[in-house]
Image (spheres, rainbow, N blue to C red):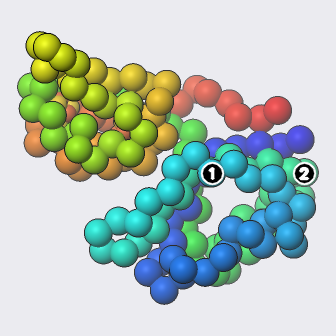
Amino acid sequence: MYSKILMLRFPQKEVQQPIVCHLAKDFDLVFNILNARILHRREGVMVMELSGTKKHFKDGVRFLKEQGVRVQNASQEVSRNDEKCTHCGACTAVCPTGALWVRRPDMSVTFEQEKCSVCELCVTACPVRAMDVTPSNRTFSK
Ligand code: SF4
Ligand code: SF4
């Protein structure tokens, strides 16, 4: 079984199309959606774990690209530079998974990397660029 975590970026015109269903129906792939979001400029972003035989995996990814979907390997991780972070809280407003949250009563911002889906929304939201995306050593093959 071949398995990877992918980030899919759907162009505006494809956001409403059931493209992902074809991965199961036509390519015999199993997908587990970890995060899905429509950004302000109407681009759709989805993080999913995709599993199947290597051939089916390749065919499925080729199909996605033919539909205009940008497919990226999400085997990256986000980390925080604690020396730069001012605990302003801006990132907590955009984090869809609750990986960044305000601890009370001291109102410090906590980052729980294991909850992070690597959507990168906090990277651009952070005014002091404290959040970094780096290649991950994690492997997702089963
Ligand atoms: S937006 Fe940046 S500086 Fe503010 S709490 Fe988040 S990581 Fe820290
Ligand atoms: S990349 Fe940032 S905003 Fe996205 S899930 Fe991870 S911590 Fe939250």
Seen in the image, is 36 located left or right of residue 58? left
Structural distance between the alpha carbons of marks 1 and 2: 18 Å
24 versus 32 height, above or below: below
Tell me the mark number nearer the camera, choosing from 1 and 2.
1
Q: Is residue 95 visible?
A: yes
Q: Mark 1: which amino acid?
A: Ile
Q: Residue 105 location, x and y as percent?
A: 14, 14
| Of the image marks 1 and 2, the number of the one nearer the N terminus | 1
99 versus 26 height, above or below: above
Seen in the image, is 108 located left or right of residue 4? left
Q: Which residue is mark 1?
A: 33
Seen in the image, is 36 located left or right of residue 131? right
Q: Residue 45 location, x and y as percent?
A: 47, 61
Q: Residue 27 location, x and y as percent?
A: 87, 66
Considering the numbered disc 2 on the image, is that residue within a helix, a strand or a loop? loop
User: Does any atom of ligand 2 lie closer than 8 Å to the CB of label 2?
Assistant: no
Q: Residue at x 44, y 60 (%)?
A: 37
Q: Quadrant of ligand 2?
A: top left
Find the residue positioned furthest to the front.
Answer: 105
Seen in the image, is 47 located left or right of residue 91? right
Label 2 packing within 10 angstroms: few (<14), some (14-19), many (20+): some
The mark found on residue 53 in the picture is: 2
| The image quarter in which residue 106 lies | top left
Q: Residue at x 23, y 49 (%)?
A: 124
Quadrant of the drawing holding the N terminus:
top right
Q: Are marks 1 and 2 in contact (CB under 8 Å)?
A: no
Q: Mark 2: which amino acid?
A: Thr
Label 1 packing within 10 angstroms: few (<14), some (14-19), many (20+): few
Q: Residue at x 48, y 40 (%)?
A: 117
Quadrant of the drawing holding the C terminus:
top right
Q: Nearer the viewer, residue 44 or 101?
A: 101
